């Protein structure tokens, strides 16, 4: 049996890392790709540099509702609590060699108080 974390465990680590205020400790691959309603960000460092300030403005809590997983993929359904209320989110998490290599996020960004274009 492999000692690497399962896709579901890594999906939960994704949420837990943000909730703990330690996104730098989330096991993201160097070539990590994040796709959201705002577009695509390629590279772990680029992602963290752009998203940490946005999350600090927009996200007060993430509450996991359900996870489903297979060998290298997981879906995690959660509530993203913001200053404007709750936004339902589902993330498709792809993993390889014990790291998250890609996440595709599905949510309605219209209720977020600060959007990416506010930081540019």
Image (cartoon, rainbow, N blue to C red):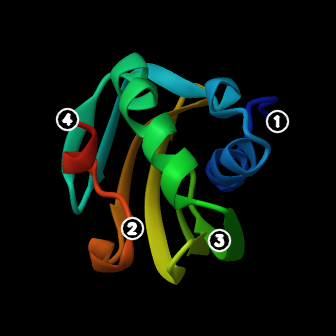
What residue did someone put label 1 on? Answer: 1
Contact (Cβ within 8 Å) of mark 2 with mark 4: no
Q: CA distance from mark 3 to mark 4?
A: 34 Å
Q: Please determine whether, in this image, residue 73 is positioned above or below residue 78.
A: above
- Residue 76: x, y in percent? 57, 67
Contact (Cβ within 8 Å) of mark 3 with mark 4: no
Tell me which residue sits at (66%, 53%) in the image: 15
Contact (Cβ within 8 Å) of mark 1 with mark 2: no
Say which of marks 3 and 4 sits in front. 4
Tell me which residue sits at (70%, 72%) in the image: 64
What residue did someone put label 3 on? Answer: 67
**Mark found first going from the N terminus, 1 or 2:** 1
Q: Please determine whether, in this image, residue 63 is positioned above or below residue 73.
A: below
Q: CA distance from mark 2 to mark 4?
A: 15 Å
Tell me which residue sits at (79%, 44%) in the image: 20
What residue did someone put label 4 on? Answer: 120
Tell me which residue sits at (48%, 22%) in the image: 29
Is residue 19 visible from the viewing direction of this image? yes
What residue did someone put label 2 on? Answer: 113
Say which of marks 1 and 2 sits in front. 2
- Residue 77: x, y in percent? 56, 75
């Amino acid at each position: 049996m492999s000692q690497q974390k399962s896709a579901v465990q890594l999906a939960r680590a994704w949420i837990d890392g943000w909730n703990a205020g330690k996104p730098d400790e989330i096991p993201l691959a160097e070539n990590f790709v994040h796709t959201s309603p705002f577009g695509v960000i390629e590279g772990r460092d680029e992602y963290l540099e752009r998203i940490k300030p946005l999350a600090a403005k927009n996200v007060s809590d993430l509450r996991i509702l359900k996870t489903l997983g297979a060998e290298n993929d997981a879906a995690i359904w959660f509530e993203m609590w913001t200053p404007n209320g709750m936004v339902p989110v589902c993330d498709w998490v792809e993993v390889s060699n014990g790291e998250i290599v890609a996440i595709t996020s599905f949510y309605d960004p219209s209720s977020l108080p600060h959007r990416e274009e506010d930081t540019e």
